[in-house]
Image (spheres, grey):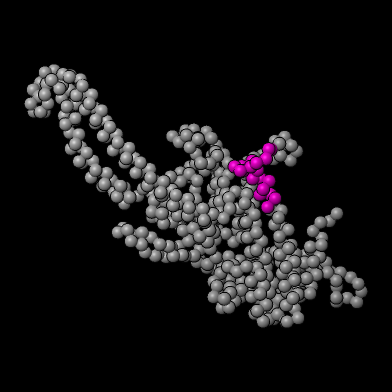
C-alpha cells in the first residue's frame, strides 16, 4: 500500500457520481446494475441515520458554549448534570472524529504562523493573539490553487496562481472574561463573547489569508501603505509649518520673557509690547491650535477611511466565502462525513465484488487509487482501513440458500480468510443484509 505525502483521502466526486462511475466501468452485469444502485441507496440511508446520532451529540454538548443560543437552559434538570468540562471534551472529540471521517485533516500551528508572517491577498499587516483561546482546532480539505488578481507596486493589476483550501473549518473556545479584563481592550469593544465557542466553515480560502477567519484578528497598514499615507502628510505639513512660524516665534518669546525676564527680542524679531500684551498671544495660540488641529483631524480621518476600506474589503470577501457558522457547521460536516464514508464503502465493495479473486487490504487500496488515476485522472490517497472496518461491522441474518430447509445464517458484508484477503457478499445477499440491518435499527 503506497503512502503519499501530497495526496488527500478526499474523493472529489459526489456519491451518485461514484455509483454511476462504477456502473460505467462495465464490470457489473446489466441485469445487476439496478441492484447495485439499490444497495448503494439503502446503504446511504443507513449511514444517514447512523450519523444523525453524532449530530445530536454535537448539538447537546454545544449548548453551554453556543454564543447564538435562543433558549433557556434548565441547569438542575436531570440529564444536565454532566460537567461542562466533560461536555467540552465530548464536543471537541466528537467534532474531530466527524471531521476525520469527512476526510478533513488538521492545519498545523506553523502553517497558521506562516500565514501571519507572509503577505496576503488583502496586503495587510495582521496579528492574532492565540493566547485568547482556551481551545482551538483548525481543519481543511481540498488542497488546490486558484487565480487571483493582485495590485502591483505601480498600481497595475496582474493575475497570479494562489494556493488555496477548498474547505476550512475553525473551532475556537475563548478564555473566560477575567482574561480580557486584564487586557487594554474593553469588553464592549470585543466582537465575541468570552467563554463561548465559535465554529466557522469557509470555502476557497487562500493559505496566506487564514488569519482573517479569526474573530480577534487585528489589521493595520503595511509599510507600502504607510509610506503612501505618510509622504503626502509630510508634504502638506511643510507649508503649514512655514505658515505658523510667526505664531510659534511669538509663543517662544512669551515663554522666554516669563522664565528669564527681560531679554533682547531683536534676535526673535518679536516686539516687546506684543509680548506684554495678552491679546496677540491668545490670537497666536488659537490660530496655531486651529491650524494644527485641523491638519491632525484631516490626517486621522484619512487614516480611518483607509482602515474602513481595508476592513470592508476583508468583510465582503469572507462574506461570500462563508458557508456556515456555529451549529450550522455541524450539520454540514455530518453530511460530508456521510458522503465520504458511503463513497469509500461503495468503492471498496465494488472492487471486491468485481475482482476475480479476494484481495488483501493493501492490494485493494492500491487498486482503487490506480483505478481513480487511470480512469478519471484523479489522484487520491485512499484510506482503506475505514471502509474495511465499516463493511465488517455490518452484520445481518439472511436466508440460507445453501440449505434445503428454511433457515437463516449470520453474515457480514465483508469477511477475511486466514491470509487476510477480503471477500464481500454477492449483490443479492448484500441487499438482503443491509435491508435486515435497516429493519432492525429499532428493537422494541
Q: Position of 57 compared to 124: left or right? A: right
Quadrant, the C terminus: bottom right
| Residue 436, horizontal then vertical, whole percent | 81, 65
Residue 77 drawn above or below residue 311: above
Residue 319 drawn above or below residue 341: above
Magenta segment: 55-73
Residue in the image at 49% along x and 33% along y: 181
Foreground residue among 123 and 399: 123
| Residue 127, horizontal then vertical, whole percent | 42, 46
Residue 230 drawn above or below residue 166: above
Queried whether the magenta region covers residue 65, the answer comes back as yes
Q: Is residue 135 visible?
A: yes
| Residue 9, horizontal then vertical, whole percent | 58, 65
Residue 376, image quadrant: bottom right
Foreground residue among 326 and 376: 326
Q: Position of 50 compared to 105: left or right? A: right
Residue 79, image quadrant: top right
Queried whether the magenta region covers residue 169, the answer comes back as no
Amino acid at each position: 500500500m503506497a503512502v503519499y505525502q501530497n495526496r488527500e483521502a478526499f474523493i472529489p466526486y459526489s456519491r451518485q457520481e461514484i455509483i454511476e462511475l462504477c456502473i460505467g466501468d462495465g464490470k457489473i452485469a446489466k441485469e445487476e446494475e439496478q441492484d447495485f444502485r439499490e444497495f448503494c441507496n439503502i446503504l446511504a440511508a443507513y449511514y444517514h441515520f447512523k450519523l444523525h446520532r453524532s449530530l445530536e451529540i454535537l448539538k447537546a454538548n454545544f449548548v453551554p458554549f453556543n454564543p447564538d443560543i435562543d433558549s433557556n437552559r434548565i441547569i438542575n434538570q436531570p440529564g444536565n448534570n454532566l460537567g461542562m468540562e466533560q461536555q467540552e471534551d465530548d464536543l471537541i472529540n466528537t467534532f474531530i472524529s466527524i471531521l476525520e471521517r469527512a476526510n478533513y485533516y488538521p492545519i498545523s500551528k506553523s502553517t497558521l504562523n506562516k500565514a501571519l508572517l507572509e503577505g496576503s491577498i488583502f496586503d495587510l499587516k495582521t496579528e492574532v493573539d492565540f493566547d485568547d483561546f482556551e481551545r482551538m482546532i483548525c481543519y481543511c480539505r481540498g488542497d488546490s490553487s486558484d487565480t487571483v488578481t493582485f495590485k502591483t507596486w505601480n498600481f497595475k493589476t496582474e493575475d497570479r496562481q494562489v494556493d488555496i483550501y477548498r474547505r476550512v473549518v475553525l473551532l475556537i473556545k475563548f478564555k473566560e472574561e477575567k482574561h480580557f479584563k486584564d487586557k487594554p481592550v474593553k469588553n464592549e469593544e470585543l466582537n465575541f463573547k468570552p467563554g463561548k465557542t465559535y465554529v466557522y466553515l469557509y470555502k476557497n480560502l487562500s493559505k496566506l489569508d487564514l488569519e482573517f477567519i479569526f474573530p480577534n484578528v487585528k489589521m493595520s497598514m503595511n509599510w507600502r501603505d504607510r509610506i503612501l499615507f505618510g509622504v503626502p502628510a509630510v508634504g502638506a505639513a511643510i507649508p503649514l509649518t512655514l505658515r505658523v512660524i510667526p505664531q510659534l516665534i511669538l509663543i517662544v518669546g512669551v515663554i522666554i520673557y516669563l522664565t528669564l525676564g527681560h531679554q533682547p527680542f531683536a534676535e526673535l524679531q518679536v516686539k516687546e509690547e506684543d509680548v506684554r500684551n495678552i491679546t496677540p498671544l491668545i490670537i497666536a495660540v488659537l490660530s496655531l491650535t486651529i491650524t494644527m488641529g485641523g491638519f491632525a483631524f484631516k490626517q486621522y480621518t484619512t487614516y480611518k477611511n483607509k482602515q474602513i476600506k481595508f476592513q470592508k474589503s476583508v468583510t465582503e470577501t469572507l462574506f461570500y466565502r462563508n458557508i456556515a457558522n456555529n451549529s450550522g457547521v455541524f450539520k454540514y460536516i455530518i453530511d460530508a462525513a456521510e458522503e465520504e464514508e458511503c463513497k469509500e464503502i461503495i468503492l471498496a465493495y465494488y472492487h471486491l465484488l468485481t475482482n476475480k479473486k479476494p484481495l488483501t487490504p493493501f492490494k485493494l487500496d492500491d487498486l482503487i487509487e490506480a483505478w481513480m488515476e487511470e480512469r478519471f485522472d484523479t489522484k487520491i490517497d485512499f484510506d482503506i482501513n475505514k471502509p474495511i472496518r465499516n463493511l465488517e461491522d455490518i452484520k445481518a441474518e439472511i436466508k440460507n440458500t445453501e440449505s434445503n430447509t428454511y433457515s437463516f445464517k449470520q453474515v457480514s458484508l465483508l469477511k477475511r480468510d486466514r491470509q487476510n484477503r477480503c471477500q464481500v457478499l454477492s449483490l443479492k445477499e448484500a441487499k438482503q443484509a443491509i435491508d435486515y440491518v435497516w429493519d432492525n435499527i429499532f428493537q422494541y
